[in-house]
Amino acid sequence: MLILLIVLALFGSLASVSVAVLSKQRASVMETRIQTFRNRNLLKDDLSVDLDIAFADRILKPSVERIANAFARILPQKSIADVQQQLTMAGNPMRLNTFLTFWAVAMGTVVFISVFVFTLDMALFPGKILIVAFLLAIGYVYPRTWLKSRVKAKQKLVLKALPDALDLITTCVEAGLGLDAALQRVADNSEGPFAEELTKMLRDVSMGKLRREAMQELGERIGVEELTNFINAIIQAEQLGVGIAQVLRVQSDQMRTARRQRAEKAAHEAPIKMLFPLVLFIFPAFLMVILGPAAIRITEAF
């Protein structure tokens, strides 16, 4: 009887172990299948999300980032900082990576053209070397020249709008408004880059930045000497406790005087600038009109 109980106990133990192992294997198989199904769904969802993204965001932007990062490793950090500052002064017409990509593409295009010029004739002569050097200089300088032209165009618009804006600020302050309210009035009633930069400065002040720091950043973003002098005068007046209206009146008079001097300078430079088109284009046409009939008659006479 004891032996029978032992046998039954061993048989039950073996059976329970076998069932546990089989169930564990079956559970592991089921878990593996479920995990595979989940991974497949996640991969499918990722693919669907990627396909939902626009082509520019999936392909173009990563390509631009890679090209910009590769080109940034070659350039000195000082050049990159200068480009970033000029982009800020130009009103951020594009991002830094976009400009670096544009610069790299321009250089690559010029290098390709230079290689093509050399492959036309393998003989090296000074003329071809000069052409290649000229092309390389254009590829390197043109993007920076374009950016500087944008900066100068913005500064010219700011210089044109600055005297009238300063007169309006002076009038508003003398009428009883505070300096911030006067600047806001000018930003609301004006258009152009100066109004946009003024609105940005006032937004920084409303977000908690000191007005002194915000105005200094305004001067750095625009880079006009007259505006920088005006900002320094305002800051010094606040620090010394001088009346703002008096300082604004003096700055307004100086700004109008500077505008008149620039106009007189441009008027004095006009005859010299007109000399080259006169000599190159208008005088030859006059000579052809005047001497042409005489030359025809002389040739007919002989």
Image: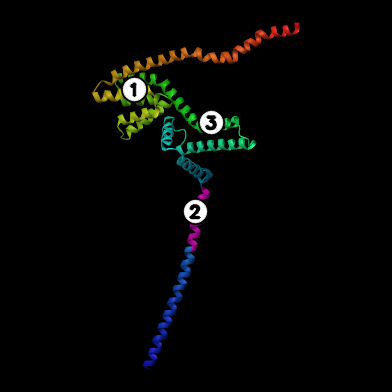
Q: Residue at x 31, y 17 (%)?
A: 250
In terms of secondary structure, where does tag 1 sit?
helix
| Image coords of residue 221 (percent x, y) | 39, 30
Q: Is residue 244 placed above or below 282 in the rendered structure?
A: below
Residue 283 visible in image = yes
Q: Earlier in the sequence, mark 2 or mark 1?
A: 2
Q: Could you tell me the amino acid type at mark 2?
A: Asp
**Residue 138: which numbered mark, if any?**
3
In primary-sequence order, the first of circles 3 and 2 is 2
Q: Are marks 1 and 3 in contact (CB under 8 Å)?
A: no
Predominant SS of the magenta segment:
helix
Q: What segment is highlighted magenta in the picture?
A: 36-52
Instruction: Return the residue at label 1.
Output: 229
Q: What's under tag 1, amino acid-wise? A: Asn
- Residue at 44% x, 79% y: name it: 18
Viewer-nearest of discs 2 and 1: 1
Q: CA distance from mark 1 to mark 3?
A: 36 Å
- For disc 3, the neighbor class at 10 Å (few under 14, some 14 to 19, many from 20) is some
* Structural crowding at the residue carrying mark 1, measured as other residues with C-alpha within 10 Å and reported as few (<14), some (14–19) or many (≥20): few
Q: How is the image coloured?
A: rainbow
State the quadrant of the C terminus: top right
Which residue does the numbered mark 2 point to in the structure image? Answer: 46
